[in-house]
Amino acid sequence: MVMQHDSNSCAQGCNMMRPLVSIVIPVYNGAAYLGEAIDSALAQTCPDTEVVVVNDGSTDDGATEKIALSYGDRIRYFAKENGGVSSALNLGIEKMRGQYFSWLSHDDVYTADKIQSQLELLSDAPDKTVCFCTIRQINAKSALISGKKKMELADGAILTARQALSYALRHTFNGCSMLVPKAAFDECGGFDEEMRYCQDIFMWWKILLSGYSLAYSDTVGVLSRVHNAQMTGRQMTVYHRDALKIAQEAIPAFAALSDRETNLLYEYAVGEAIHANRENVALCMKAADEKKLFTPMQKLRLKRLLLYGVTLRPMLRSVYYRTVKRI
């Protein structure tokens, strides 16, 4: 059963000539950071926003709910039984009133002009376009721990769907950096609720495969928090399970779109090798053999990258997270 605390005040104050953006914040036992996330969402320079907080069955004796309810009708609040972040995001999409969706993790922070800068870019883009922005990382104490991440794209660049797929396979998107038309979810469906780790990657790929262009705003829009408790530093078994599920749909799709010049399957296989997804690399090899998509040198490189992914990369990640914990 969904419990809600709702208000119509957000929608009533919006200029109908401008699109409404729904900032959806899924949260589970997030009392430590939720207030900071909500404050950053409410502080957007774009006035046409609503903040939708979805409590995914927190078990912290009401601490998370107390923080959310303290904002009164400045936000829209929904509570549900625990089902994972995908289910919380899907409920947020179901309840949102906006024409655009923007995900904010409960432990991350938006800069004040995140939404405005992206809307300005999308105003001159094709209708079927999603937008992402630059991020910087912060630690548990909200101190900056990384420089501005270079994305190898010019500010305002708009990639076709095919170009975007190639780019997405070679770079990792932070889900909170995205601004997505609600229509994209109507067309492609919501986040896969069986996934607990890779639901965002799979979602963006589905949207791009359906023909959406990708726009890039060089504005730093998200301060992404790195801390010891988050899932990205642990539970790799869950990650590999999700990655295998994605492969069942991704490999046939990328193989069908690939040729020797634009080899999406090879770009996908490179990422899977780096992340030590042995079974997926083998499936890519098999699919490539049918169309002769991989050269002998590419096959050798995949084997070397897989060795790196299995041995060296986990050690480097472990050192990184231990370092962040001490900051």
Image (cartoon, helix red, strand yellow):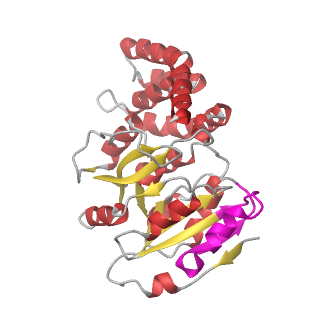
* Residue for point 55% across, 70% down: 52
Position of 247 relative to 58 (above/below): above
- Residue 121 sits in quarter: bottom left
Looking at the rendered structure, the number of numbered marks drawn on it comes to 0
* Percent position of residue 82, x then y: 73, 57
Of residue 320 and residue 135, the one placed in the foreground of this image is 320
Position of 209 relative to 296 (above/below): below
* Residue for point 42% across, 61% down: 180
The stretch in magenta equals: 55-83
Q: Is residue 310 left or right of residue 256?
A: right
* Percent position of residue 151, x then y: 31, 41
Of residue 286 and residue 182, the one placed in the foreground of this image is 182
Q: Is residue 71 visible?
A: yes
Position of 305 relative to 165 (above/below): above
* Residue for point 51% across, 71% down: 51
* Percent position of residue 240, x then y: 62, 32
- Residue 282 sits in quarter: top right
On whether residue 201 falls in the magenta region, the answer is no
Of residue 248 and residue 292, the one placed in the foreground of this image is 248
* Residue for point 57% across, 56% down: 33
User: Where does the N terminus fall, quadrant-wise?
Assistant: bottom right
On whether residue 75 falls in the magenta region, the answer is yes
* Percent position of residue 299, x then y: 43, 15
